[in-house]
Amino acid sequence: MTFRSVFGSLLAIILLAASAMAGAQDFPSKRITLVVPFPAGSATDGTARRLAGELSRISNVPVIVENKPGADGNIAALHVLRSDPDGYTVFVTTNSTHAANVNLFKTLPFDPKADFAPVTGIATIPMMLAVRSDFPAKTISEFIALTKTRPQPVTFGSGSQTGRGAGELFKEREKLAMTHIPYRGSPMALTDLMGGHVDSLFVDPVSAAGMVQKGDLRVLAVTSAKRASIMPNIPTLDESGLTGFELTAWIAAFVPVKTPQAAVQRLNALLTGILKDPATATFMGATGATPFPTTPEQLAAFAETDTKRWAKVVEAAKMEKQ
């Protein structure tokens, strides 16, 4: 190899490194869109809007939230994958698209691991079993007894795969004749719960907080291993007799896999900076969520582990693939 060829190779490497550094410094320079797979009013939507405001403030570029509900998040996932992989379209999604769906659908129009690059975890959120305030059962044991004695099946709604998974697991463990009613999002499910069209609902505290505070809803238990800080008086399902019961949701940020690494790292730095701010922890704590900042590598490992966990949930709950 001649001196000229060696020099040329070194120069190319230096130029590529300089270009990557420049890209990281320049990003972001235009509007960022956070795509959410659930409707306005959901936990994911509320979290994304908080992030959008803070991200716009510290980056000095507009940041908007675009809701693309439907098909348990698959519609939004495809929308993101069809966007330019430049870091300006970010998928603020949940375990529905990146852990549960691969176990709940016979085929998916995308590969959560191969088609997306992880950016950072955002939040973890417990689910809760809620009923209307006039519902006869006031505890989990009363709810189970009612379900076993009432002539017609008790219905439970869900606006996410985590809500559905929690309900199906609860139903199977207690051998209950319950009927699942799926919804495109928690706000619609809550509307039907209040309207008497569904008996109970596995829902996140964020979506239902207002109704709980007004006394319109009664929470019987939460699905997390520990009690939720926002509802310290509400027992867990484990405490209520379902030993070892735990199923929580998580929110995270992903981008199309071909997004430049410089943009991924810059997004990670910006978002984790927001998530580590005490003000963000206070905001999330008031809604029952917990900040979950990670490196891209940590999120990738976490999502893979949770995908395996969902396989066990689907098997234990005897959930049929769609």
Image (tube, grey):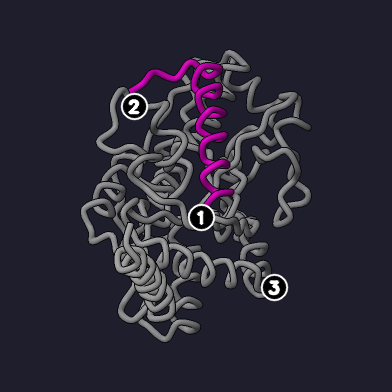
- Residue bearing mark 3: 278
- Residue 8 shows which numbered tag? none
Which corner quadrant holds the C terminus?
A: top left
Residue furthest left as drawn: 82
Q: Is residue 112 above or below residue 87?
A: above
Distance between mark 1 and mark 2 Cα atoms: 26 Å
Label 1 neighbour load within 10 Å: few <14, some 14-19, many 20+: many
The percent position of residue 180, horizontal first and vertical second, equals 43, 27
Left or right: where 98 falls relative to 175: left
The picture places residue 261, in percent across and down from the top left corner, at 41, 61
At label 3, which amino acid type do we have?
A: Pro
- Vertical placement of residue 15 versus 5, above or below: below
User: Looking at the image, is mark 1 or mark 2 earlier in the sequence?
Assistant: 2
Say what secondary structure mark 3 lies in: helix
Residue under numbered circle 1: 207
Comparing 270 with 18, the one in front is: 18
Task: Decide which of tag 1 and tag 3 comes sooner along the chain.
Answer: 1
Q: Residues within 10 Å of mark 2 (few under 14, many from 20)?
A: few
The magenta segment: 296-322
Where residue 99 appears, as percent x and y from the top left, is 47, 36
130 to 28, vertically: above or below: above
Residue designated by label 2: 105
- Residue 146 spot, x, y in % from top left: 61, 22
The answer for how far apart the CA atoms under marks 1 and 3 are is 22 Å
Q: Is residue 111 magenta?
A: no
Magenta stretch: residue 316 in it? yes
